[in-house]
Amino acid sequence: MMYGIGETLADRIEHLFRVREVQRATGGFTAFICWPLQPENSELSHIPKTDAVTYLKTQAIARIVLENVPNIQASWVTMGMKVGQVALRFGANDFGSLMMEENVVSSAGTTYRTTLSEMQRLIADAGYTPKKRKQDYTILEDAA
């Protein structure tokens, strides 16, 4: 769910309820990721950028509302490593993955990058055990 384009808080909640209902009907979602608009270098640059507190609140509410979606992913790509790490305490159970190429938020000027070892350290420092997974969220046993 990309947000921060002028919708109300009620609009965001309604969106989450709709995702929950679709999940109840289909069971098709393996994960949910919320990320704020990255307005820089776009026609929407007049819109203020979402702050970390708003992102973390949205993340936490998504975890509560979307109790039937098994994985909530932290958006370190839009919010940075430290906020991504804190998002693990706000409902995320997935830190995402390394990307070979990212063109959406980087075109707006957001260019957070990491390495596998840094990602594993951030997860461990937050008090969790890093695990590798497949794209379908199957945990790989040799994940250390």
Image (tube, helix red, strand yellow):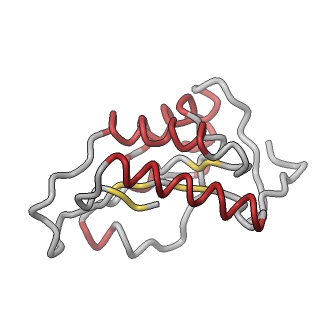
Q: Position of residue 37 (x, y in %)?
A: 30, 60
Q: Position of residue 112 (x, y in %)?
A: 38, 55
Give the quadrant of residue 21. Answer: bottom right
Q: Which residue sits furthest left?
A: 46
Q: Nearer the viewer, residue 33 or 20?
A: 20
Q: Position of residue 10 (x, y in %)?
A: 37, 48
Give the quadrant of residue 134. Answer: bottom right
Q: Which residue sits furthest right?
A: 141
Using residue 64 as the reference point, say whether residue 113 is left or right of it.
left
Q: Nearer the viewer, residue 109 or 18?
A: 18
75 vs 87: above or below: below
At horizontal 59% and vertical 59% (from top left) the residue drawn is 19
Image quadrant containing the C terminus: top right
At horizontal 74% and vertical 49% (from top left) the residue drawn is 70
Q: Position of residue 91 (x, y in %)?
A: 59, 36
At horizontal 59% and vertical 47% (from top left) the residue drawn is 95
Give the quadrant of residue 3. Answer: bottom left
- Number of numbered labels in the structure image: 0
Q: Nearer the viewer, residue 68 or 103?
A: 68
140 vs 107: above or below: above
135 vs 116: above or below: below
At horizontal 28% and vertical 61% (from top left) the residue drawn is 38
